[in-house]
Amino acid sequence: MFEANIDEKWNSRLDDARKVVAAQIVESVKTKWGTAVALEAATGICQTEISRIRHGKFDRFSLERLVRLLRIVDPDVEVELKLKVVPRGDG
């Protein structure tokens, strides 16, 4: 049960991070490129991928992949993620 709680908490935080990065991708596409069509023509990123992200269907995207896409979409954006390691105390 304890392991399941840790996994749920980790997955929840990972989902939150993916949502933040995905929202920035959508915003950057809108402000820097105008349309997903223009983005695809310039970068080769498929319109379908941007559409999935725009509609919140990014479960198939890892956080790493989303960050890589963001760096392509908007190289001026800086991504800062914080990781805190806390000992479990069962030692």
Image: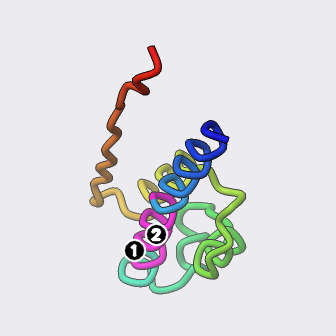
Q: Dot 2 lies on which element?
A: helix
Q: Quadrant of the N terminus?
A: top right
Q: Is residue 10 above or below residue 39?
A: above
Q: Which residue is mark 1?
A: 28
Foreground of the two, 76 or 10: 10
In the image, 70: left or right of 52? left
Measured as percent of width and height from the top left, residue 54 is found at 58, 79
Cα distance in 3D space between marks 1 and 2: 5 Å
Measured as percent of width and height from the top left, residue 53 is found at 61, 72
The span shown in magenta is 17-27
Residue drawn at 62 percent across, 63 percent down:
45
In the image, 84: left or right of 44? left
Task: Give the main secondary structure, helix, strand or loop, of the magenta stretch.
Answer: helix
Q: Inspect the image, locate mark 2, and give the three-letter code of the amino acid beneath it.
A: Ile
Q: Inspect the image, locate mark 1, and give the three-letter code of the amino acid beneath it.
A: Ser
Magenta stretch: includes residue 14? no
Q: Is residue 6 above or below residue 22?
A: above
Residue drawn at 44 percent across, 13 percent down:
91
Measured as percent of width and height from the top left, residue 21 is found at 44, 63
Colour setup of the view: rainbow
Q: Are marks 1 and 2 in contact (CB under 8 Å)?
A: yes
Residue 39: give its label: none
Foreground of the two, 4 or 32: 4
Q: Residues within 10 Å of mark 1 (few under 14, many from 20)?
A: some
Residue drawn at 49 percent across, 67 percent down:
19
Q: Which residue is mark 2?
A: 25
Measured as percent of width and height from the top left, residue 58 is found at 65, 65
